[in-house]
Amino acid sequence: MLPSGDSDQANSQVDVAVVVVTYNSSEHLPEFFDSLPGALHPLTSYEVVVVDNASHDGSATVAGQLWPEATVIQMGGNLGYAAGVNAGVAMSSSSQAVLVLNPDVRLGRGSVPTLLHALSPETGIAVPRLMNDRGRLIYSLRREPAVLRVLGEALLGGDRAGRFRALGEVVAIDSIYEAPVHADWASGAAMLISRECMDRVGPWDESFFLYAEEAEFALRARDAGFLLLYVPAAEAVHIGGEVHRSAELWTLNTLNRWRLFSRRNGRLRSRAFWLSLVVNEGLRAAMGRGPHRAALRALLRSGINPPAG
C-alpha cells in the first residue's frame, strides 16, 4: 500500500490537496502514483483527490486500489477537465494549496514542497519545469493570446515565433526556462494554486470543457493580482501529445483559443483574431495536416461569432 497523509488530519487543514482528473487514464495511473510519495517528500500533511469523468477503463477503481486513502469522486459523466478540477477543489477545502495534475504526469522528487515554498501573497500559482518522456524540455510557458502572435505562428511556425515576445504565444527560448520567471499562463498539466488565489479568483470556467481552461483561470488570477511563477527546481515528466494527433481535440483547442480571446477583447479585435486563426489553420491544412483541416472547417462554419460554451 502506498503512503498517504495522516488520516487523523482529515478534518484539519493540510498543506496540499493533490487533485487529479481522470478520463480513461488507467494505463497512466501506476506510474503517476509511483511518483507521488517522492514528489510529496518530506510533507506529511496532504490529501489526494481523484475525480473521474466516467471512464470506461476502470480508472476510478484502479486509482482506489493504488492509493486506498484517496477520495475518489465519480462525476457520472464526462463533464470536462474544469468541472473535475472544481469538484476536487470543493472536496479539498481544508488545504492551504491545491495541486492540479493530469494523470499522465510523473512528478519529480521533492517537487511539491518546492512549488509550495514558491507561493506567496503575490504568487498565487506555481508551475514546474516539464520534460517529455524522452527527457527533452517542454515549452510550457505562454504569453497572453494576441492577433499578432497567431499571425506570427502562422507564418513562422510556433517555435520560431515563440523566440520573439511579440510574435509567439508559446515561450520558446530555452534560456528562459533555466531560472524562475513569471508568465502570463502555463500548461495546466501540473499547477499548484494557493487557497487564497482559489478563493478570490473563483472556480475554473466549466464552459471550456477541455483546453484554454487553465489559460482562462491564470489570466483571471492575474487580473485579480496573483502572479504565476515558473519554478525550474521542481520538475515533472508529462507524456501528453494527444491534441496534436486528434482532429477532434485540435478543433476543440482552436475554438477555445478563439472563445477565450473574444471574452477578453472587443468585437473588432476578436474578428481579427478569428481571421488570424483561419490563416494559421488554413496554411497547415494546405500541407495536408488532418487536424488543421478539421479546425479550419469548424472556424469557417462558426463564422466570425465564437461558439457558445
Image (cartoon, helix red, strand yellow):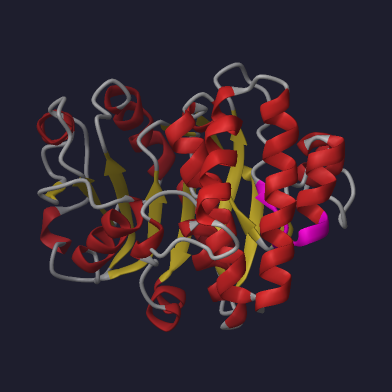
Residue in front for this viewpoint, 36 or 295: 295
In the picture, which quadrant includes the N terminus? top left
Query: Which contiguous range is marked in magenta?
Result: 141-148
| The magenta stretch spans residue 41 | no
Picture residue at 60% right of the left edge, 16% below the top: 134
Picture residue at 34% right of the left edge, 51% below the top: 81
Residue 258, quarter of the rendered image: bottom right
As displayed, is residue 238 above or below residue 305?
above
In the picture, which quadrant includes the C terminus? bottom left
Residue in front for this viewpoint, 271 or 22: 271
User: What is the tally of numbered marks visible in this picture?
Assistant: 0
Residue 48 vs residue 118: left or right?
left
Residue in front for this viewpoint, 172 or 77: 77
In x, y percent, where is residue 142?
69, 53
Picture residue at 41% right of the left edge, 65% below the top: 308
In x, y percent, where is residue 73?
13, 51
Residue 23 vs residue 266: left or right?
left
| The magenta stretch spans residue 147 | yes
